[in-house]
Amino acid sequence: MFKKLISDRRALIGLFIIALIVIGVVTVSWWAKYDPYQSDLQNIAQPPSLKHLLGTDELGRDVLTRIFYGGRISLSLGVVSVGIGLIAGIPLGMLAGYFGKGLDLAITGFIDILLAFPPLLLAIAMVSILGPGLYNAMLAIGTSLVPFYARLVRGSVLAIKERDFVEAARAAGGTAFYILRQHILPNCISPLIVQSTFNMASAILSAASLGFLGLGAQPPLPEWGTMISRGRVYLRVAPHITTFPGLAIFVVVLAFNLLGDSLRDVLDPYMRKRQKIFI
Amino acid sequence: MLGYITRRLLVTFCVLIGISIFSFLLLHFVPGDPAQLLADPWSTKEQIAYLRHQWGLDRPLYVQYAIFITNLLRGNLGMSIASGRPVSVEIAQRLPYTVILAIAGTTIGLLIGGGVGIISGARPYSLVDNIAMVMALLGTSLPSFWFGLILIWLFAVKWRVLPSSGAGTLAHLILPAMTLGIGIAAIIARQTRSSLLDVVRQAYITTAYAKGLTESAVLFRHALRNALIPIVTVTGLIFGRQLGGAVVIETVFGWPGMGRFLVESIFTRDYPVIRGALLTFGILFALTNLFVDLLYGVIDPRIKYV
């Protein structure tokens, strides 16, 4: 599988970009010459130069340094949100798919109501309850992913639970929990990996949108959406303050989408024909 | 067909009930006294007590829900804390702007995305197809608010040909609709191409060519019509999702729609408005889905037997 994946140009480009960014954000505190929070009022909104490769922002902070520190926030936000979606979505989908009947009806109904709101709007609704902030944004975006995972897993479970090997495990006296964990879950992994890759992209995008709206990470945190929202005021005189963080979001989201596209083709040839929701 | 329509209507009705329960419970999830949240910060104890009584907040949850629904059916969503005006009036003022923006964006998306998708699907793996699909992939990864700011910088700041914010004239609509439309176009282009590719492998397409029909006749009369269903599904889904995206784009362009209103209300903790706005978005989304489902029946007559 891995061989197939690295022979695909899309996966290679995607993985390369992700690896580069992960290395960059992990090591930023070693190589960065500037402090991401320390303002330098002598050097406000300077255009890119040799001293500041991507220029400085409205408080004279180095944009490049802040983008890489911001990458820590965006990537961990993506991972945590997807994690929340998985942790809550998988059991819900399994219970609904395996036990069926009333439980299925209740869970599917719940999922359908959550799906009645566009994901970003659901996240915004959550933030309106929890209040703005980085951790609340993680929780909100994670929650907005839950229905997608639950529905995906439920569908897979429905297809798998009638197969002979599950029947055999049941006849051998396996408990529901054992069968779900040992026999059904491993068979759901491929679509979950594909979905999670796309969800990383969409979670990072949603987080940046929340940050931009002022509902996510709060300044002075160098979150990409927040940086764009701050720099927006200086669009006329210093467009670079908004341009570069935006480019960072764009490149990271693109990398995950490329990887997702390729993974989908490699892991699950049938999924290509299925309707894609997270694009 | 009638059975299909009835079933879809029933499903939509259940979803609407769900949406109403969700927005009803919203207030109860927020820490604090719901009556206090509905009242403005300067209200007296008597005013809060009056609100508590009016919305039945001192009674069991199911009674509260019944009161909420009765008020809702009468168009009473409470008073906005920020403006002191009825929430329904405030929403009615802004809703048309959001709908216009969503329709304009989806139309642009369908025209560009559909066109590009057809060209790509008709000449798969050609240079044109490759370029188009790379562009489409780039388009799906574009943060809309950032793209909007770039358009503002180009068209409003640099070239000074279009207004950067506000509403009222067609010129004001162009930039926000373009921002919305490009993202949609990218998704529709990919979907159109892949469903066209699925269709052209079918035997009836070979037959159509064998009959000696021209390529455009085969493409438009046979292939595209059958490729439409997934395209319609995706367009419907996107329209709904754009309602969410509109929140961001309306903020970028100062467009006086529901999305910007919702965000402003979150900052002022104007809970009657937040509740009303989410409810409206949910209803709009549910009705769009219903419309798409009914449209299937028209495009594909086989669906009525399902």
Image (tube, helix red, strand yellow):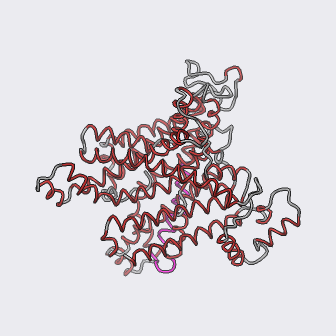
Q: Identify whether A175 is placed above or below B81.
A: below
Please report the bounds of the magenta region as a residue range: A77-103
Q: Identify whether B213 is placed above or below A183.
A: above
Picture quadrant of residue A183 = bottom left
Pick whichever, A115 or A48, lies toward us.
Answer: A115
Picture quadrant of residue A12 = top left
Residue at 69 percent of width and 58 percent of height: B273
Residue A148 x, y percent position in the rendering: 48, 61
- Figure disc tally: 0
Residue B210 x, y percent position in the rendering: 11, 55
A161 with respect to B253 (left or right): left
Residue A80 x, y percent position in the rendering: 56, 52
In what quadrant of the picture does the N terminus of chain B appear? bottom left
Pick whichever, B219 or B19, lies toward us.
Answer: B219
Residue at 42 percent of width and 65 percent of height: A185
B124 with respect to B88 (left or right): left
In what quadrant of the picture does the C terminus of chain B appear? bottom left
Q: What type of secondary structure mainly makes up the magenta span?
A: helix
Residue B150 x, y percent position in the rendering: 52, 34
The stretch drawn in magenta includes residue A78? yes
A225 with respect to B274 (left or right): left
Picture quadrant of residue B232 = bottom left
Residue at 33 percent of width and 45 percent of height: B115
Pick whichever, B250 or A133, lies toward us.
Answer: B250
The stretch drawn in magenta includes residue B66? no
Q: Identify whether A167 is placed above or below A50.
A: below
- The answer, for residue A129, to whether it is visible in the render is no
- The answer, for residue B194, to whether it is visible in the render is yes
Q: Identify whether A19 is placed above or below A267.
A: above
| Residue at the farthest front position | B169
